[in-house]
Image (cartoon, grey):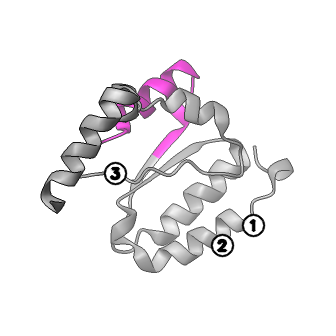
């Protein structure tokens, strides 16, 4: 029966492989940051109710970036300001958190162009 298949697979995996194959790994922003490079932005696709701000604040604190972490909530008319913040971030090494990108779909091609034009040796 189809309605029992998912549960049966779940039980099978736990029994023969272990529960660690069922549980999602804990999110580790520090590890993501360490694996990243300056031309590859970290992108968070969030589910309802999740918020990476606390983890980002802790990482910024650990790396003495508190004063250089900039945030902008995208929406009506925020595209130009966001572009300026990203450009400045690339020049001086600020971090920029773009929130609510789903509210600024029309600006996403601009962000894509900015990211594709990034040159690692020219980014702070």
Callout count = 3
Disc number lying in front (3 or 2) = 3
Mark 3 and mark 2: Cα distance apart in space = 23 Å
Q: Nearer the viewer, residue 89 or 45?
A: 45
Q: Which residue is mark 3?
A: 46
Residue 11 is inside the magenta segment: no
Give the residue at x 57% y 68%. Answer: 111
Give the residue at x 59% y 34%. Answer: 33
Give the residue at x 43% y 24%. Answer: 58
Residue 14 appears in which quarter of the rendering? Answer: top left
Q: Which residue is mark 1?
A: 117
Numbered range of the magenta stretch: 51-70
Give the residue at x 53% y 48%. Answer: 96
Whether residue 8 sits left or right of residue 75 in the image: it is left
Coordinates of residue 10 in the picture (x, y in percent): 27, 40
Position of the N terminus by quadrant: bottom left
Mark 1 and mark 2: Cα distance apart in space = 6 Å
């Amino acid at each position: 029966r189809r309605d029992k298949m998912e549960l049966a697979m779940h039980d099978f995996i736990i029994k023969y492989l272990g529960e660690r194959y069922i549980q999602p790994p804990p999110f580790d922003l520090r590890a993501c940051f360490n694996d990243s490079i300056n031309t590859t932005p970290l992108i968070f696709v969030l589910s309802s109710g999740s918020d990476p701000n606390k983890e980002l604040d802790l990482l910024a604190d650990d790396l003495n970036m508190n004063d250089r972490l900039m945030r902008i909530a995208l929406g009506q008319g925020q595209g130009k300001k966001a572009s300026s913040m990203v450009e400045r971030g690339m020049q001086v090494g600020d971090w920029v958190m773009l929130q609510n990108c789903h509210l600024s779909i029309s600006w996403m091609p601009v962000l894509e162009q900015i990211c594709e034009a990034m040159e690692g040796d020219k980014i702070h």
